[in-house]
Image: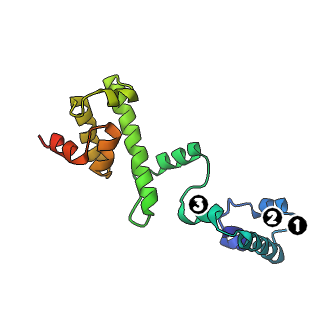
């Protein structure tokens, strides 16, 4: 946790003094940082099931949905093997939704049109082909999102 690190060992933009002050700790000193760490650990120990901390332990983003979408847009195309699978999957899904929006606009369709059009509609097939080319999402996800039936039938339609 960067807030308990000495000022020279944390990012320059981080203002630990503000956080410490919010907790009634008067300075960014070794004693102040130790007191903050003690309080955080005491609070953590009070949690019986740890459910409140699960998002911090497993998740990659803590914030509103709008903030999360902004972060996904900024990360598009910049993720590597070292990034968590959940982050890569969400990033690819955000990219796919952006592509889907572009394609719906190009075709003059609304999202509801996906459910009203035939599973093998040429427009749906074009969108699916683009999603396959430009994302790493599985065909199962694409077929479900475009309402094309099973992934096997979508695969057969794409390869005709």
* Quarter of the image where the C terminus is located: top left
Q: In the figure, 22 relative to 141: above or below?
A: below
* Residue furthest top in the image: 108
Q: Nearer the viewer, residue 85 or 2?
A: 85
Query: Residue 128 at x, y = what percent?
Result: 26, 40
Alpha-carbon neighbours of circle 1 within 10 Å: few (<14), some, or many (≥20)? few
Q: Quadrant of residue 130?
A: top left
Q: Quick check: 60 above or below 113?
A: below
Q: Relative to 145, is 7 on the left or the right?
A: right
Place of residue 13 in the rendered image (x, y in percent of width and height, measured from the top left): 68, 59
Say which of 146 and 127 sits in front: 146
Q: Are circles 2 and 3 on residues that touch, CB within 8 Å?
A: no
Q: Earlier in the sequence, mark 3 or mark 1?
A: 1
**Residue at (84, 61) in percent of width and height:** 21
Element marked by disc 2: helix
Q: Name the residue located 57 percent from the left edge and 45 percent from the top edge.
A: 65
Q: Quadrant of residue 51?
A: bottom right
Q: Residue at x 41, y 38 (%)?
A: 98
Q: Please tell me how crowded label 2 is: few (under 14), some (14-19), or many (20+) other residues with Cα within 10 Å.
A: many
Say which residue label 2 marks.
20
Gap in angstroms between the C-alphas marked 2 and 3:
23 Å
Q: How many marks?
A: 3
Residue at mark 3 to residue at mark 1: CA–CA distance: 30 Å
Q: Is residue 53 visible?
A: yes
What is the quadrant of the N terminus in the image?
Answer: bottom right
Say which label, 2 or 3, has the lower sequence index: 2
Badges 2 and 1: C-beta atoms under 8 Å apart? Answer: yes
Which image quadrant for residue 10?
bottom right
Residue found 66% across the figure and 73% down from its top: 9
Q: Measuring from the top left, give residue 34's x and y in whole percent.
A: 78, 76
Residue beneath disc 1: 26
Residue underneath mark 3: 55
């Amino acid at each position: 946790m960067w807030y308990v690190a000495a000022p020279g060992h944390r990012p320059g933009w981080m203002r630990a003094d503000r956080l410490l002050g919010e907790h009634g700790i008067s300075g960014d000193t070794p004693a102040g940082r130790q007191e903050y760490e003690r309080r955080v650990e005491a609070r953590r120990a009070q949690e019986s099931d740890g459910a409140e901390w699960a998002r911090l332990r497993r998740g990659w983003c803590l914030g509103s949905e709008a903030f999360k979408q902004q972060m996904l847009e900024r990360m598009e195309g910049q993720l590597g093997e070292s990034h968590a699978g959940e982050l890569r999957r969400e990033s690819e899904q955000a990219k796919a939704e952006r592509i889907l929006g572009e394609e719906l606009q190009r075709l003059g369709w609304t999202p509801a049109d996906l459910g009203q059009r035939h599973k093998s509609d040429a427009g749906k097939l074009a969108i699916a082909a683009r999603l396959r080319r430009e994302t790493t999402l599985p065909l199962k996800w694409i077929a479900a999102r475009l309402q094309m039936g099973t992934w096997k039938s979508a695969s057969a339609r794409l390869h005709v």
